[in-house]
Amino acid sequence: MSADDPGVEGGVRDDAASDDAYCPPPSRRAQPLVALTGMPNSGKTTLFNALTGSRIQTANYPGSTVEHSEGKLNTGAGELRLLDVPGITSLSPSSQDEMIAVQALSGHSPPGIPEAYIAVVDATQLERHLYLARQLQGIGRPVLVAITMVDILEKGKGYRLDSSALERELGCPVVPVNGVSGLGIERLRQLIGELIADRDRQAGTPAHPNQPIEFPRPTFDEISESYRELKILSAKVLISIGKERAPAGSDQGRPGIDFPDSRTEKFDKIFLHPIFGIVVFAAIMAIIFTSIFTLAQPLMDLVDNLFAGMATILTGALPPSWFTSLLADGIITGVGALSIFLPQIFILFLFLGFLEDSGYLARGAMLVDRFLASVGLSGRAFVPMLSGFACAVPAMMAARTMGSRRERLLTIVILPLMLCSARLPVYGLLLAFLTPPDKPWIGGLSLTALYLFSASAGLVVAALLGRLLGFKKRDRAPLLLELPAIRRPMARVVFRTTLHRTLSYVQKAGPTILVVAVILWVLTHFPSQTGMSEAEQLAGSWAASLGHFLEPVMRPLGLDWRVGVALICAFSAREVFVSALALTLMVAATGDAVQSSLLLAMRNATLPDGSPLFTLASCIGLIVFFIFALQCMATLAVSRQESGGWRVPGLQLILYNAVAYMAAVITVQGLRLIGVS
């Protein structure tokens, strides 16, 4: 337990009064609760999905499940609630995500008191994984052991598991399962139903009290003795089939000793090499971020033409009116301006999915651990930082895997600087404006540079804050990370997860985009007067009146009130900037593609003195602004939740937006000073 994180103690968190105060209702719920638990990377969440039909994100690194998830499980004999909790190594938590799991397993959290447990055990690492199952058996509640990775045990390690012998040794049901192929799933359902069949008879008895459980804290000697027994046990139930010999120095290949399969060993010689590993890591990151800009272009053009066609059909089918203009110029144009960039977001999630499912992310964390140590972080910060490239909200929740509260807060502070998917529409538009149409590779390299710069900015902030707050290297929690086996990603699973993530992004951003699009259309089209041109209508609109207050602030950036209004709207969500800009520039629904019309409007937009509104200097200034600005209310809310107050999010909001504005002004004025207008 980290010395600076006193809340992790004994299974109940000191700073979570609402959780600690939870007391189950006197009457038992109609549906029993069964908890699914296991060590990280054991295949627990994949099994949960197979049992319940849920689509919870599965990731091959610790911390992918940071809150418990609940699903319905039909056992044939009745329906029950199945609870998936974060991966843990034992019932003595050492980090915040483990604390969430232990609270749920003990009945100290709102899901209720589990009546039975399913312990998920990796067959290739029996010694360590069976320890948790043994602890659960000591509670006195029914336990069922689900064995995963049996195929890897046989094909990669050359051993076969005698599940009948293991069942006799443990004294509880043991079922080999595969959440992807479906092996053992129906048998597992049946056994779960049998475990809780007599729940009504046992309810409230001394053997089955209806109250939260207090887990015992074993001594060091007790833990050591348990592992010695489990080493002997695993040697009894693992049978060599002669496909692979143990590596040198592995205690003559005793099955009780865990060792990696040959394929994983070969890959790790490259992935974890101090030189080649860095080269591979840099190449993977460059391919991902370049592909986001280049591979997505054909799909972006398809979506662009789709929305343009919808607007054309709508304006041709309905008579000219304010309602037609609202639908075509407001809603379709506004929503379409964002939807164009969904292919880029999809590709980002797809690449991250393949990295997660292959087992590479944990290697990346080990690889950058020494580098992150120089700024007061550890390799565990790598996963939240990489997740931050998708969205800062789940990234902040993934930071719960860190045992040190100080390191966790430092990671939360820098996560808004990661180039999240909400910034992609903004950068996609601005880079498309600056990039020659016949040289898309320039845009791809520029986007890669922005990703690298955002990550570097986060590390610089971490180093400065760490030094300012007196964070020393010895205060840094050591990196103890389990490396999962390297495996071939399941394309079907990765694609389904990517589609789910993308749809979740649309569901989160869509309502905001729609509301802002309607509000902006009203602001840019009212008060309405007949006989006025579009330019005159916009100049006399409510949006113009509001925007003129922003002129003194926007002038140093070389921009005017139209961009200022779009920036204000972007504080609801960064991606709104694109839709808002389309409306303030009066991009009308025509036969042309939405993005083409918006880019043309940007090139034709001028300041009152006739000079171009969007120049190389002003566009780069906008890019710099979005690198540092914190414009996401959801991020602030989660930052408050994870940090335990408003001090951290308040600091983020004030500091980052102030730095964003000053950096943008310095960039624009500096470029102008050297002759770049």
Image (cartoon, grey):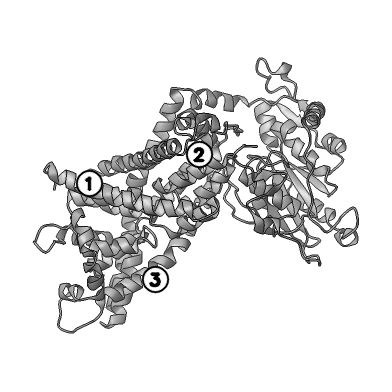
Q: What type is the residue that disc 1 sits on?
A: Ile
Q: CA distance from mark 1 to mark 3?
A: 34 Å
Q: Position of residue 82 (x, y in %)?
A: 71, 56
State whether residue 47 appears in this view: no
Q: Quadrant of residue 479?
A: top right
The residue under label 1 is: 666
The residue under label 2 is: 381
Q: Position of residue 234 (x, y in %)?
A: 78, 29
What number of labels is visible?
3
- Mark 3 Cα-neighbour bin, 10 Å: few <14, some 14–19, many ≥20: few
Label 3 sits on a secondary structure element that is helix
Name the residue rendered at 57%, 45% in the picture: 400
Look at discs 1 and 2 and give the one toward the viewer.
1
Q: What type is the residue that disc 3 sits on?
A: Val
State whether residue 426 appears in this view: yes
Q: Position of residue 588 (x, y in %)?
A: 24, 70
116 versus 259 height, above or below = below
The residue under label 3 is: 515
